[in-house]
Image: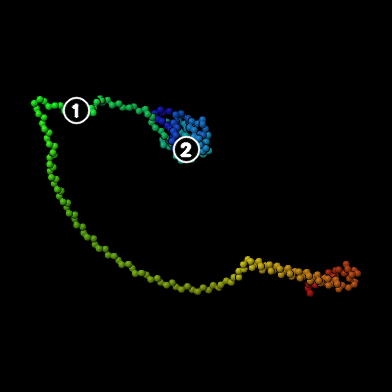
Amino acid sequence: MDSSRVFRLVMRRGPQPDKIFTLTEELLTLGREGSSEIAVNDPEVSRQHARLAFQSGGYVIEDLGSTNGTFVNGSRIAGPYALSNGDEVGLGEMIILAYQVSIGAEAETVVSMAPEFDIPSEPLAAPPPPFGISEPEPASASPPPLAARPESPPPPPLPSQPEPEPVSVMPPPPPREHEPLPPRPPTTATPVSRPPFKPPEEERKSRKKLMIGCGCLLVIFVCAVTLGVAKLLWDAPTEFWQDPIGNFSSLFGVVMLLPFF
């Protein structure tokens, strides 16, 4: 591995935010197991989630058949992927690790060759003047008067611009009157007669009355037949009772003819 560069993963989102994993081996495993080189204790991470391999001066990440997948910059990878500085590695959708590559602290320090001098904290006093020479008095520090600044000439007058010509405004057109619509021809369609609407309750009542009437007619018919048979048996002659089985056919025919009278 290149010792001049430092490779690491920084947890941006997960159970241990801002935790730094320094990559020092050529083959590392990322997973939930404690035996993994980069252990992430989260239920979304598989036991052996992904693998990092050092190739061509950088690390290549590969998914190990995890359940929730391995992502690089938001896209799920299906094979080996070479990481670049600043890539974001996602273990599932909740764990995000930032891949960082930095140069190691092995730069040479530059030493200055200039001599060092001790600088006194107080200023040195001026040497005394020679014997017999009086020290001249300091001259007044009044500045010379400033010369009068010449006035700048006035700016030349701007050329007069021609006045804009008046724009003639056209009057709006008079409002247009709406023309009356032609009368519609009378319709010759004949109204369609519809049967009166019967509510469901009335229809049920009428059906019930019809059934009751039919039942009454059936009862009247049965009673009439029964009374007719009884009347025939009551008025039967004596010869009929001597041989009732032989005369039953004639009696049955008479009974069947009763509804027609």
Residue 206 left/right relative to 111: right
Q: Say if 126 sits above or below 78 in the image.
A: above
Residue 249 left/right relative to 145: right
Q: Which residue is mark 1?
A: 124
Q: x and y percent of residue 12 in the render? A: 44, 37
Dot placed on the residue nearer the N-terminal end, 2 or 1: 2
Q: Is residue 256 visible?
A: no
Which residue appears at 71% of the width and 70% of the height?
Answer: 213
Residue in the foreground of this view, choosing between 13 and 225: 13
For mark 1, give the secondary structure. Answer: loop
Residue type, numbered disc 1: Leu
Which numbered tag is attached to residue 14? 2
Residue type, numbered disc 2: Gly
Q: Quadrant of the C terminus?
A: bottom right
Residue 184 left/right relative to 137: right
Which residue appears at 23% of the width and 60% of the height?
Answer: 164
Q: x and y percent of residue 123 in the render? A: 20, 29
Residue in the foreground of this view, choosing between 147 and 177: 147
State the CA–CA distance, disc 2 to disc 1: 66 Å
Q: Comparing marks 2 and 1, which lies closer to the viewer? A: 1
